[in-house]
Amino acid sequence: MIKRSLLVLTALTVSANAYASAKCPKAPKDQWMHVLDMQKKIVNDYGFAIKKFQTDGNCYEIYGWGLNDKKDKFVKVEVYFNPVNGEIVKKVIDD
């Protein structure tokens, strides 16, 4: 019973870490890209479809879809962006 509990706890911890927020650099809000400019970059430059856009700590974050080139299909993604330059800081793909 104890081994099974440890296995479940380990699985939950790994899952939680996979979806834990990213570490974006701290920057004053007046240096952040405007929300609409960031959303355009996400769609036009990275090719993501946005379901939900939000601020998470020092990051912009989306939940949406992206093309998985290996499987040639769209998959759910969670992506964190540096709000100053729009670079991807962390990407989680849900195959």
Image (cartoon, rainbow, N blue to C red):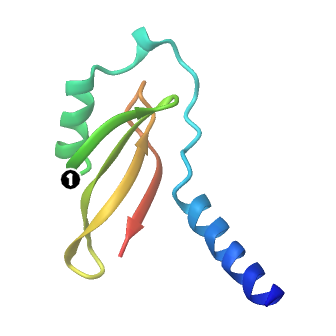
Q: How many marks?
A: 1
Residue at x-position 20% and y-position 78%: 72
In depth, the one of 89 and 20 nearer the eye is: 20
> Is the residue 38 above or below the residue 26 in the image?
below
On-image quarter of the N terminus = bottom right
Does residue 51 sit above or below 30 in this rendering? below
Residue 64, image quadrant: bottom left
Q: Which residue lies at the image location 58% right of the left edge and 61% below the top edge?
A: 16
Residue sticking out furthest to the front: 1
Which quadrant of the view contains residue 45?
A: top left
Residue at coordinates 20% horizontally, 53% vertically from top-left? 47
- Image spot of residue 7 (x, y percent): 72, 83
> Which residue is at a point 70% across and 73% down the rendered structure image?
9
Looking at the image, residue 4 lies above or below residue 69: below
- Name the residue at the right extreme: 2
Question: In the displayed image of the protein, which residue is found farthest to the top?
Answer: 30
Q: Secondary structure at mark 1?
A: loop
Q: Is residue 46 left or right of residue 81?
A: left
Compare residues 24 and 21 and report the one nearer the observer. Answer: 21
For label 1, the residue is 47
Eyeballing the image, is 46 above or below 95?
Answer: above
Q: Amino acid at mark 1?
A: Gly
Q: Is residue 29 left or right of residue 12?
A: left
Viewport quadrant of the C terminus: bottom left
Residue 70 located left or right of residue 10: left
**Other residues around mark 1 within 10 Å, as few (<14) / some (14–19) / many (≥20):** few
Q: Residue 12 location, x and y as percent?
A: 62, 70
Residue 75: x and y in percent read: 27, 69
Q: What is the x, y in percent for residue 65? A: 24, 60
